[in-house]
Image (tube, coloured by chain):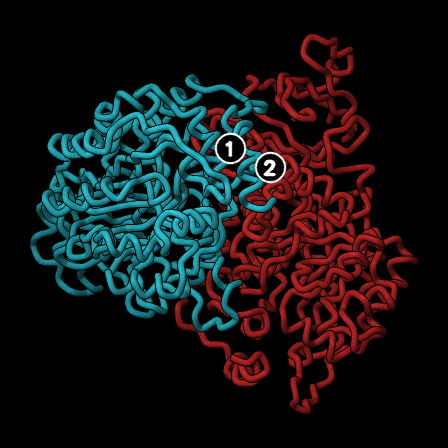
Chain colours: A cyan, B red
Amino acid sequence: MNFIIKNVLIATDDDYTTVDVQVVDGIITAIIKDGQDAGSANQDGRSHTTNGDKLLLPGFFNAHTHSSEMWQRGVIPPFPLELWLAELYDFTPLDPEQVYLTALGTAVETLLSGGTSVVDHLVLIPGKELETIATAVRAYREVGIRAFVAPLIQDESLTAGIPSGDAKRTHEAYFRSTAATLELIEEAVRQFHRPDEGVNILVAPTGIQLCSDALFEGCNELSNRYNLCRHSHLLETKAQEKLALEKYGCTAVEHLQRIGYLSDRTTLAHCVWLTQDDITILAETKSTVVHNPLSNLRLGSGIAPILKYRQAGVNVTFGCDGASSNDSQDLLEAIKIGSILHNATDLDYQHWITPRQAVEMASLGGAKGLNLAEQLGSLTVGKKADMVLYDLTSLSLLPRTDPIGLLVLGRPTNVVDSVWVNGKQVVASGKVTTINVDELRQELFNHSQWTAQRKSPTVAQIEAHYRMVMGL
Amino acid sequence: MNFIIKNVLIATDDDYTTVDVQVVDGIITAIIKDGQDAGSANQDGRSHTTNGDKLLLPGFFNAHTHSSEMWQRGVIPPFPLELWLAELYDFTPLDPEQVYLTALGTAVETLLSGGTSVVDHLVLIPGKELETIATAVRAYREVGIRAFVAPLIQDESLTAGIPSGDAKRTHEAYFRSTAATLELIEEAVRQFHRPDEGVNILVAPTGIQLCSDALFEGCNELSNRYNLCRHSHLLETKAQEKLALEKYGCTAVEHLQRIGYLSDRTTLAHCVWLTQDDITILAETKSTVVHNPLSNLRLGSGIAPILKYRQAGVNVTFGCDGASSNDSQDLLEAIKIGSILHNATDLDYQHWITPRQAVEMASLGGAKGLNLAEQLGSLTVGKKADMVLYDLTSLSLLPRTDPIGLLVLGRPTNVVDSVWVNGKQVVASGKVTTINVDELRQELFNHSQWTAQRKSPTVAQIEAHYRMVMGL
């Protein structure tokens, strides 16, 4: 579908201007300033005329989430990651229908908060791994969001993720072999990896805390063979920092560099506990940090040193993280908190993230991390039309001041008017057009129930050890 | 108006139950459990029946804001308080009509995010001080929110608020005398202080950084004579900590205690830079801390030691702060961030704020701070009916898990169904019923314009000195 958006505000280097934006075959083909001739191309397609009270921005990347966690949002008590994870897995959904519904929900919330791409570090249902992936892919295709499905894999069992301290501990073997896991991912790539159709498979070991070197190296090999991006959690908690030293005798970043996992198509979620040398390694390897500020606060993981990353030239973008450690999928919220949080860490305000920088991190930063900066991440002629149109007449964005300042620093409500992914409109007049969101709400309602008193048996089992090791 | 809300969820000690809530003459007169007889009283009035998919909570307090800052939300660059304030005052609104519109806006955003009371630390237009107060009072009466108008006063000029360091500096005298300022407040009390009608005037020196002892002491005297609550900023920034030591040779808290400003009806906004001894003083004097987490982050003021306050028994509640240091008036956002932010400051998760504790801080905590815990802050028979009904079928609160967990930890969107203040309904079906919000939006739009490039002359003038004193 070809179309032109007329009379829309876009950001220039340090101001705004009103333009017409023309899209042909999913590509931005012209950005025409006031009074210039739009040429004949706009006569081919539909025209969206705004009153000059709408702002067009490139779509953001929800660069790290776990869609099925949405089933447990709001319910896990204030716990640090290791205990939170134990509770999460005690109640993890085991029905692909559940995966489907929350992939839809994650896509909808991402779109309605300015995102056009989602990186779903997808928790796989044991024994139904390919079906889980197929289900998430189906949901994302239906909604029409650009999908980066990163099947979450590991080859060590959960208790191995907690440092041993002085205790000698053994852990059950993980239920699936490393080789079988790699084979599974390769099969997923064959079946679902269709970058031209907006569906991408990533290699995504969960992190050093639960993965062997063999798993990381197998992923490297798949990444090289099929040209796949790489994803992982990295040093989310103090406990993981301890664990890396126990496991490798060096930092996790040094180890990942040694085994070749870091690259310009590697995105690393969290990155809270890095040393200055680690930061240099991320910059040298052109790795991307995915900042999940809300999750890091909710789980008490710490405040990632984002200003240091930026000063060292490390690419940074934002993620919501899964909806049970956030407990939302509102990308504008993650961008706001992920920007202002760091002002408290550096007295020099000249280092603080400006709203325009935040927008660039959320759009171009995400595209860079997924090795797609040539195709996505800015309103540039020749790039794909992943674009979001914001209605600046929402009460939450009034009075009129600086539109990007209002979007990033405010608490925008009902502001996303339209969204296009690859030139296809998927949100119009504030409503998702591709699926029936009221039906989705009804399904989510029907498949759940109020609960205030559930208890995790695994937490009961491991809490004393956790407190001992962490000196609590 | 008497009414009964039927079949509504409320929180019990550690669970939820479905009840009917009966209100007569603005007072909660009965909370009737499933199956019990509602008696005859419900036959007098209207009945609101919910399907058991709505949650009733006590109204929250937006316990610190500056309404007219809304004119500058989104536009002030990332600056620390002292520079931010200089820019704020360079562009402060001077027309009472502007004050009116943003008081309406502040009230509407507060109501639609769960608040039923607002403490407006109101910036006064020079020469039109009483008119400013009258205008804000009129706006709050029209919307029907419970209003605590705290006219912001000082008797030293702005440059006095920055520490001198080694430099010898003199400051222009403030344009109005201390005596005239106190007289102004007394006149405001006479004209507008009507607690029974939901309008309260507070004494509210802006803070130690710009106020003489004579001003604080005059406020004490008015507070005692007219039974007024006391409000002030306190130790928002590192610079203010330095300034207090320069000015008093002791901490600001020690000084305020010495001059008698601290009490069980004193609310203190920010409280970021307190010592352990200061915290003990707040506990002993039963003073209340108003936590403004978003503003503290946005201005890089720091992270207030809220967990320490709670452990010391200090009452804490939440505020949005003015909309140009936040840049919103979404109370649920302030409650969420004000809860989870502190998880990063204490490794022991048993100290972290739970969603239920956050709700109590936002409701009963606010009532305590304003010396109204006997009348407000909980759903209790005999208390005033300041209540908010949340629609739990919003996508942002699905799937169903723990309703309060979803509200506090999620990012609720369009969830406030109904609000009653003093038993009067002011929001129904998600819409404010007392004023025309579309007209308000239009007025705010018409009175403003897009701007990306404004420059503050005062910032240009003081920035070099600020950087020098702060060692930047």
**Chain containing the residue with disc 1:** A
Q: Name the residue at 9% across, 58% down.
A: A39
Give the residue at the far bottom of this rendering. B168
Q: Nearest the camera: A279 or A250? A: A250
- Secondary structure, mark 1, is loop
Circles 1 and 2 in contact, beta carbons < 8 Å: yes
Q: Crowding near pointer 2: few (<14 within 10 Å), some, many (20+)?
A: many
**Residue B467 drawn at (x, y percent):** 53, 81
Classify B374 as above or below B273. above
Quarter occupied by the N terminus of chain A:
top left
**Residue A119 position by quadrant:** top left
- Secondary structure, mark 2, is helix
Residue under circle 1?
A74
**Chain containing the residue with disc 2:** B
**Residue A354 drawn at (x, y percent):** 41, 65
Looking at the image, residue B131 sits to the left or right of residue A377; the answer is right
Separation of disc 1 and disc 2 at Cα? 9 Å
Residue under circle 2?
B355
